[in-house]
Image (cartoon, helix red, strand yellow):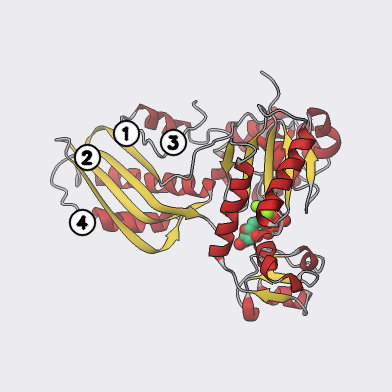
Amino acid sequence: MPERRIAHIDMDAFYASVELLRRPELRELPVAIGGRGGRGVVTTANYVARRYGVRSAMPARKALELCPQCVFLPVDFDEYRKFSRLFKAAIATLAPLIEDRGIDEVYVDLTELAGETRALGQALKQRIVEATGLTCSIGIAPNKLLAKIGSDLEKPDGLTILRAADIEPRIWPLPVRRINGIGPKASERLNGMGIATIGDLAHHDAAALIGRFGPNYGRWLHEVAHGRDERPIITESEPRSRSRETTFERDLHPLRDRAELREIFTRLCEQVAQDLQRRRYVGRTIGIKLRFDDFRTVTRDMTIAQPTADAADIQKAARACLKRVPLERKLRLLGVRVSSLSAEDAPPAGPSPPALGESLDLFPADDAALAQSEGRPQQANPNPRGR
Ligand code: TTP
Ligand code: MG
Ligand code: MG
């Protein structure tokens, strides 16, 4: 198999850059988006404001302390979504194999395209700036893991090409936290073991990592430290919904098997929530599906005020839907669906363990059970890597 060429493209100071297109007079000033009037949090700041230490997710009050002359602008999600569509469309004119990773980033598979890697990267940047007036940073590498690290190495307006030979000099000196999937907790535990950099991690005994973090995460840590990542680009178009459903091994009685049903129900809600969070989608319509032992299928849904990807929110709405169905027979199948999706505007809630399920199968038992069940959802593909 030829070595892949995967690009990770991430827009520079995205919300701030979009705002500055219509306020060019503010370009040289420190600008933060959100947190107006000293309340709330900053969503992002332009690079001028970052020199003062202003950062995403920082309370506005703190940002003002660091940079009293900072200009605060209100958020305008509709505008950011518009530019999000524009830059992705510009990429698609050159490279059709795109994996959407949320409002300001994508992975693109360049393997089959003609042309030298750096020239392709430059052409992509060119198309994006022509279509939007915005700059981005691109990492191009043999896999998603390295491409993602790479896009961050020379921000803003960066173009970083990483090959296997670059892992040791360029990746190993970086803190472990730079790996997408090593969150603050894992990072802290690793630091406690004397592992600060990715190189430290690579040199650590794999068996010891497995002993400490379990087989899935431990082995994954060892692999990523060596820059190994086989995940393919997932080029599905914007999904209209995500769902999980499961057919029971035996039909379950709504009262007698209540405890078991409740547990399954909770897990389905959690799985849908994880699926949404991983893809940075939120949804407003929550629905359930029931199939009775006579194969009659019933669905109910409801639309909530605030789009969500939170398991508890989903479960609350799904339970309200469930209350609308008379449960007079045994059940064969239960499903939970979230639709009316939009790209999440907030950042992911940190690469916590669920996000790792993307690289390694954290829930093999569940996936196996799902794969066997007849109700393998078409839209929600819980196992896109075909394990
Ligand atoms: P990022 O790509 O993480 O940040 P950025 O584009 O602002 O800056 P960079 O040049 O470092 O890529 O996030 C994209 C947008 O998501 C960002 O412009 C605003 C929003 N966002 C939040 O609302 N809250 C957050 O905590 C983060 C990190 C981002
Ligand atoms: Mg960005
Ligand atoms: Mg981003």
Horizontal and vertical percent position of residue 96: 59, 36
Q: Which of marks 2 and 3 is in front?
A: 3
- Residue 183 in view: yes
Do callouts 2 and 3 mark residues in contact (Cβ within 8 Å)? no
Q: Name the residue under label 1.
A: 375
Horizontal and vertical percent position of residue 154: 81, 48
Do callouts 2 and 1 mark residues in contact (Cβ within 8 Å)? yes
Q: Which mark is residue 45?
A: none
Residue at x 49% of width, y 32% of height: 384
Measure the C-alpha gap from mark 1 to mark 3.
11 Å
* Numbered disc total: 4
Residue at x 79% of width, y 36% of height: 118
Q: Name the residue under label 2.
A: 291
Residue 268 occupies quadrant: top left
Residue flagged by tag 3: what amino acid is it?
Asn
Q: Name the residue under label 4.
A: 324
Measure the C-alpha gap from mark 1 to mark 4.
22 Å
Measure the C-alpha gap from mark 2 to mark 4.
14 Å
Residue at x 53% of width, y 46% of height: 278
In-image side of 309 versus 156 (left or right): left
Residue flagged by tag 4: what amino acid is it?
Arg
Residue 357 occupies quadrant: top right
Q: Mark 3 points at which residue?
A: 381
Is 196 located above or below residue 165 in the figure? below
Residue flagged by tag 1: what amino acid is it?
Gly
Q: Residues within 10 Å of mark 1 (few under 14, many from 20)?
A: some
Q: Ligand 1 near label 2 (Cβ, under 8 Å)?
A: no
Residue flagged by tag 2: what amino acid is it?
Arg
Whichever of labels 2 and 4 marks the residue nearer the N terminus, that label is 2
In-image side of 196 versus 222 (left or right): right
